[in-house]
DNA sequence: GCGGTGACGGTCG
DNA sequence: CCGACCGCCACCG
């Protein structure tokens, strides 16, 4: 239980529905500037029964990492269910859905 | 304690 | 706009 992990989870929970944030964004909010990788590790350590909307966390390219699907449900489906639209390239318009963290 | 790897980011071409 | 390279730092063997 690294405290840093808890910070990351808290930052992800701060992301409102219908919005997506990049690893760097989450890392910065979590208090780990530049540690985008640790964010990825923390999310990967999550379980299916997690209350953390890890699906809202994507890379700077606006695409889903790890691959097209994970566990059985594609992350893309979850985001689309939240109202996030994907383009033909499987990318999210951070310009519109990108979380400003200003709230 | 060392080495390799990685749900990444930013810059260059 | 997209692709490729390097760099950062934590986690695992």
Image (cartoon, coloured by chain):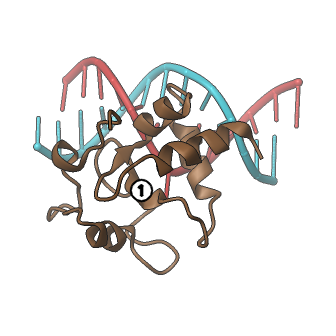
Chain colours: A brown, B red, C cyan
Residue A62: x %, y % from top left: 28, 49
Which percent across, then down, holds residue A58?
38, 51
> In the figure, residue A87 lies in which quadrant?
bottom left
The residue that appears at 42% across and 72% down in the rendered structure is A69
Q: In the picture, which quadrant includes the C terminus of chain A?
A: top left
Q: What element carries label 1?
A: loop
The residue lying at 75 percent from left, 41 percent from top is: A2
Q: In this view, does A68 lie to the left or right of A33?
A: left
Q: Which chain carries label 1?
A: A
Residue B8: name its quadrant: top left
Is residue A73 rendered to the left or right of residue A50? left
Residue at far front of view: A103
Residue at far bottom of view:
A72
Kindly identify which residue carries mark 1: A65
Which quadrant of the structure image shows residue A43? Answer: bottom right
The answer to whether A16 is drawn above or below residue A30 in the figure is below
Q: Is residue A45 above or below residue A71?
A: above
Asked if residue A56 lies left or right of residue A49, the reply is left
């Amino acid at each position: 239980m690294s405290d840093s992990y808890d910070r990351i989870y808290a930052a992800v929970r701060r992301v409102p529905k219908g919005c997506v944030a990049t690893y760097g964004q989450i890392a910065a909010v979590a208090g780990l500037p530049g540690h985008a990788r640790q964010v990825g590790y923390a999310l990967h350590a999550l379980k299916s029964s997690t209350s953390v909307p890890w699906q809202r966390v994507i890379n700077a390219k606006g695409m889903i990492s790890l691959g097209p699907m994970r566990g059985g449900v594609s992350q893309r489906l979850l985001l689309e269910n939240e109202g996030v639209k994907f383009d033909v390239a499987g990318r999210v318009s951070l310009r519109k859905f990108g979380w400003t963290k200003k709230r």
